[in-house]
Image (cartoon, rainbow, N blue to C red):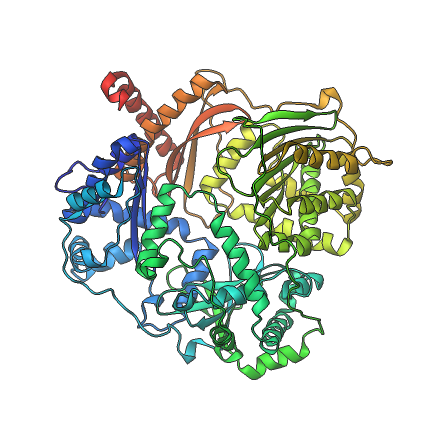
Amino acid sequence: MLFYASEKYPEEDSYSKYITEHGGSTNAYTSSEDTNYHFDINTDSFYEALDRFAQFFIQPLMSTDATMREIKAVDSEHQNNLLSDSWRMAQLQKHLSREDHPYHKFSTGNMDTLHVRPEENGVDTRSELIKFYDEHYSANIMHLVVYGKENLDKTQGLVEALFQGIRNTNQGIPRFPGQPCTLDHLQVLVKAVPIMQGHELSVSWPVTPSISHYEEAPCRYLGDLIGHEGEGSLFHALKILGWATGLYAGEADWSMEYSFFNVSIDLTDAGHEHMQDILGLLFEYIKVLQQSGVSQWIFDELSAICEAEFHYQAKIDPISYAVDISSNMKIYPTKHWLVGSSLPSKFNPAIVQKVLDELSPNNVRIFWESNKFEGQTDKVEPWYNTAYSLEKITKFTIQEWMQSAPDVNLLLPTPNVFIPTDFSLKDLKDKDIFPVLLRKTSYSRLWYKPDTKFFKPKAYVKMDFNCPLAVSSPDAAVLSDIFVWLLVDYLNEYAYYAQAAGLDYGLSLSDNGFELSLAGFNHKLRILLEAVIQKIAKFEVKPDRFSVIKETVTKAYQNNKFQQPHEQATNYCSLVLQDQIWPWTEELDALSHLEAEDLANFVPMLLSRTFVECYIAGNVEKDEAESMVKHIEDVLFTDSKPICRPLFPSQFLTNRVTELGTGMKHFYYQEGSNSSDENSALVHYIQVHKDEFSMNSKLQLFELIAKQDTFHQLRTIEQLGYITSLSLSNDSGVYGVQFIIQSSVKGPGHIDSRVESLLKDLESKFYNMSDEEFKI
């Protein structure tokens, strides 16, 4: 509501309009304990933007009409969230807590809470808004970060001049002491029915907030151990048993007063049948941590990794930096505003042990999600209508699960050999501003760009494996997908150490095959690269892992049915426009008939014709870059029994996009795949031109001018839907614009007519725009 208008700038939405038209962006969010408003903008427009920003903390206008429209926007956002499992489960966890604690409350609002109920009780929402503003918006509990190019004295004078009008009513920061959960909400097993296919186990304990001991980092220490994925870890044991495909451990839902430590496990079908064994192994691993004690060397590794990541982090964009620091100012002493919790530095076993002791059977909440619980529940969460059941369990039940769990050798991690120790910068004699073609053979092409600007001991490597067979049919696309999944699966125990040490890697399908990317500290990057290439060269299909991955991929395809309507519409648009993209229904059908033998036969054919397009940038010398690519060629192409051979000249194809005729309109109607979703969506795509510098710039200017008008007219004024956007698209070098609107109040036909009307208005605006307006 504050964004709408102020007494000094009464034109509605003029703040957002000014920001957008001057190259900036603006947003706000509310977390459990604070609200954060932020913007960025071109430097020459900063003063007026800052004045507009300050004014809605000094004399905001909250009109009755705007209030009702914002209530509708909030309700539209809630409608989008109703079928989201993450929102549903978060609210269920809140629901099962003390009713007198703020944590229990419905956290987003809807038409019922903001309009219907207040009206029934004679309460005026706008009056309550103003009352809330008057009670809580006081200068003494607000923090401001201004990030600009002027010197500090000038910036300080600017801030004092513009913000001195904010009232100070000496408000105290609201405090809500005590944990949200009583004994009634602990030692519970909750079974819930999700929207998506799959099974998930989430184990949660109320714990002492780590923020009170951010330099000791107890939850980070324990999360790194329980969430580890190397050999001997809990996840490795569950993976070998075929029971889990993912595990996350760490602090969640934390505040200054309370916190939770969560362990979330993605289960296979077999894992769902062994839930008690999995929980038994989890508590067995916690027992291992109790018996081994808090280790100095493990904390030292954590501290070294955090220190390297902090000191050699990339420059943060100004808006994110300002948001982070303004949040930190409320939490940390002044000396740590810029650092926050980034640098664990105090080894204190007692503090870690205190949190570890809280991860006990006496203190646990277990949330178990599965579609198999449908029809077996007796309760419904009121805000999202999530079906669930609840039963009490005791520590003796958990002890029985521990005793009956498989005998698995659970171990602490080994020392991490990927932690970098050499942060020196290469003596790069070349100062190329743009990537240069450094090497070209019939097998590969290497583009190289030394770091001439950032001077960090990091590198970025991208290898695009062009394999024409990869996406040539729905069957091929699915087999290629499983191939990539299995590569990641086989590498996981080894590569996890690299990722923990700040060396990320990724394998994914691409338009013409698959791609490998590595990014992070360059010191040991070559070691990881060689390990990945070796796995590709020696790839074999393990039937047990194939079965697990096939099950995982099948559920992922099935869950396309539950995508939001705007995501479905965007996918259909891609199907119409792009070559060699297949409907997920066809890929799912192909997947159902595939066996391990099919993949074993497919992969040698997939790799038999390959071209590797390489890009290497950063703290890497020319000869190092060439050596990396030469190694790939030696392993894959020039071995005595080569796995790969060069592409034929006719196989170097450019991706094709359907050309839409000038003046032609094409309508594609598709019924939404989820009958429970009351939202509908429109993608209005306009194809504009092939890649060309001048036209690209003009299209960007069009978007800059039209974006705010689109949002203001279609969302703010007409209230068509919370998801309303105008964006540029680039499909294989063919540029266009697309309007995306999702709505629970109007159908796509009506929405499309409103987009057409908006386009006419924009046309008039452009023709009538003066030279002076255009320059601004």
Q: Nearer the viewer, residue 156 or 383?
A: 156
Q: Nearer the viewer, residue 740 or 449?
A: 449
Asked if one can make out residue 430 in the rendered structure from this viewpoint, the answer is yes
User: Can you name the residue that lies furthest to the bottom here?
Assistant: 396
Q: Residue at point 22% right, 40% down?
A: 154
Residue 366 percent across, percent down from the top left: 51, 71
User: In which quarter of the view is residue 446 placed?
Assistant: top right
User: In which quarter of the view is residue 386 placed?
Assistant: bottom left
Residue 643 percent across, percent down from the top left: 80, 36
In-image side of 78 versus 595 (left or right) = left
Q: Is residue 263 above or below residue 325?
A: below
Quadrant containing the C terminus is top left
In-image side of 563 versus 27 (left or right) = right
Residue 404 percent across, percent down from the top left: 68, 78
Q: Residue at point 25% right, 55% down?
A: 114
Q: Nearer the viewer, residue 498 or 479?
A: 498
Q: Is residue 572 above or below residue 83?
A: above
User: In which quarter of the view is residue 283 placed?
Assistant: bottom right
Circle count: 0
Q: Residue at point 76% right, 40% down?
A: 603
Asked if one can make out residue 471 in the rendered structure from this viewpoint, the answer is no
Residue 454 percent across, percent down from the top left: 48, 38
In-image side of 195 versus 284 (left or right) = left
Q: Residue at point 25% right, 32% down?
A: 45
In-image side of 357 versus 115 (left or right) = right
